[in-house]
Image (cartoon, rainbow, N blue to C red):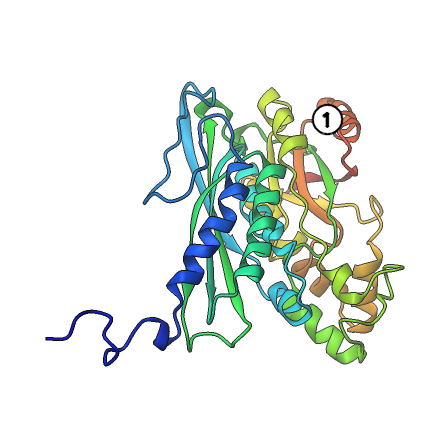
Amino acid sequence: MSEPGSKSGLTYAASGVDIDAGEALVDAIKPLAKSTRRAGAEASLGGFGALFDLRAAGYDDPLIVTTTDGVGTKLKIAIETHRHDTVGIDLVAMCVNDLLAQGAEPLMFLDYYATSKLDVDTAKRVVAGIAEGCKRAGCALVGGETAEMPGMYGNDDYDLAGFSVGAVDRNKVLPRMDDMREGDVIIGLASSGPHSNGYSLIRKVIEVSGLSWASDAPFAKGLSLAQALLEPTRIYIKTVLPLMKSGLIKGGAHITGGGLIENPDRAVPDHLTATFDFDGWEFPPVFKWLMDTGNIDKHEMLRTFNCGVGFVLYVAPKDADAVLAALLNAGEDAFICGQLAAKT
């Protein structure tokens, strides 16, 4: 009887899966995970699960909130231009900003990285971005999964999924729909660009334009198209969460797929609707360029992209000035951009 590993037997490596590379990646990213430690989590890798101590994080009567998301076809730009350092920030942002809409604090984050053949350097750069996103959000990177699946992806392709766990005390859950009234003010928080939505349309516009990823970005001086369009998604946790905990904010919406048409009303009661004053802010140059180059009508823009507004907050008129001032003092680009109105 032949022994395991004999020359005549097949191996996992021969089928295209390199266990040694996977172990090398785990060793390489352990310091990255350690750098995201926070109260309640040790952020160590290697176990089968991660524990979190809610009491150590200061919660009295907490509810757990979970979200999951990906980066979408923005990854194609990163892969085609070998710029892997910031898509991990996008991954974290897309998950933790959804937690924020519930008034929840991000506590833990896990990632799933899938590829045809594991390149340790590429994966480490991606995970370094994830760790940076976790630090910006104040959550611990506690684990993840790397899947090497020959035949499922092209040689250089990879995909990402993220999973975030947060908590909110029961009496601080948002939105407070019973408290929302006609005339409540909408405060917008500026985006850093398209964030991680609409990139299939963006890639089509680039194709129509005849430009390449290395071309100068017509809307961002000194940057290539790839650099400009890989600007990572803003993470709003540290500036907005304290205001939510203070009780000044009735609700919020993360402006993702569906844009300003669909997302804002997800956080308001059925008898109200978010109405925007489009003179309240100027569409950033990237959106103007996409609109003009792709001959995209305004409604399509508004239901596909954030159009410069990455997150919205709903506040009582009497609190609007205080909330706006606090956001500006915290370094946010914030502005009043509409109000809640009766749905007709």
Residue at (71% x, 57% y) in the render = 194
Residue at (75% x, 25% y) in the render = 326
Q: In front: 342, or 253?
A: 253
Q: How packed is label 1: few (under 14 Cα within 10 Å), some, or many (20 or more)?
A: many
Q: In front: 343, or 236?
A: 236
Residue sitting farthest toward the left? 1
Residue 146 in the image: x percent, y percent? 43, 58
13 vs 197, left or right, is left
Above or below — where is 3 with respect to 174? below
Q: Quadrant of the N terminus?
A: bottom left
Residue 138 occupies quadrant: top right
Above or below — where is 136 with respect to 320? below
Residue 76 occupies quadrant: bottom right
Above or below — where is 36 with respect to 3? above
Residue at (80% x, 49% y) in the render = 278
145 vs 284, left or right, is left
Residue 293 in the image: x percent, y percent? 82, 72
178 vs 284, left or right, is left
Q: Is residue 47 visible?
A: yes
Helix, strand or loop at label 1? It is: helix
Q: In front: 231, or 34?
A: 34
Residue 315 in the image: x percent, y percent? 67, 30
Q: Amino acid at mark 1?
A: Val
Above or below — where is 340 with respect to 53? below
Task: Check disc 1 and report the residue beneath it.
Answer: 323
Residue 140 in the image: x percent, y percent? 50, 37
Residue 75 occupies quadrant: bottom right
6 vs 298, left or right, is left
Q: Is residue 271 visible?
A: no
Q: In front: 279, or 116?
A: 116
Residue at (57% x, 48% y) in the render = 130
Give the mark count.
1
